[in-house]
Image: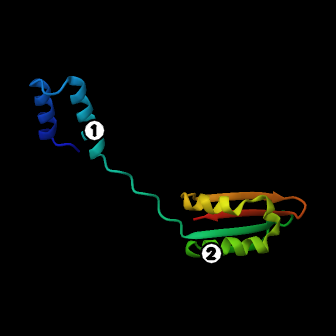
Amino acid sequence: MATSEERMQILQMVADGKLSAEEGARLLKALEEGSRPKPPPPPEPRWFKVRITDLATGKDKVNVSIPMKLVNIGVKMGARFAPEMEGVNLEEVLAAIKDGAHGRIVDLMDKEEGERVEIYVE
């Protein structure tokens, strides 16, 4: 928070005619904004999770958790085991992860195969 001394200096400069009232108001606002603590960044995701569920039984066919440090390898490997993900652009998934996406980032259903594919970042 801006100290009262800093605010008083700005007000005195306005009173002395060294600053216009508008300039003083901008400086006071800048002091307040600069003194606000920034919110902490969200925690880095630690896991990349892929779950493929059988729609008929509700049971998991695949449930894999991969450390984020291995995600590039894991995404490419996952594409081999889940060919039904043809409609998913893996480069877009990786870009979303790098941009800080959290939670479910892919959710698709293949009614022909009777499967649901979900990808999470946690």
Residue 9 pos. (x, y %): 11, 35
77 shown above or below 6: below
Q: Which mark is residue 30?
A: 1
- Residue at 11% from the left image edge and 40% from the top image edge: 5
Residue 33 as seen in the image, left or right of residue 49: left
Mark 1 neighbour density, 10 Å: few (under 14) some (14–19) many (20 or more): few
Residue 80 pos. (x, y %): 77, 74
Residue 45 as seen in the image, left or right of residue 31: right
Most distant residue in the front direction: 18
Evaluate whether residue 10 shows in this view: yes
Quarter holding residue 47 = bottom right
- Badge 1 element: helix
**Quadrant of image for the C terminus:** bottom right
Amino acid type, callout 1: Ala
Residue 74 pos. (x, y %): 66, 74
**Quadrant of image for the N terminus:** top left
- Residue at 73% from the left image edge and 72% from the top image edge: 78
Amino acid type, callout 2: Ile
- What residue did someone put label 2 on? 66
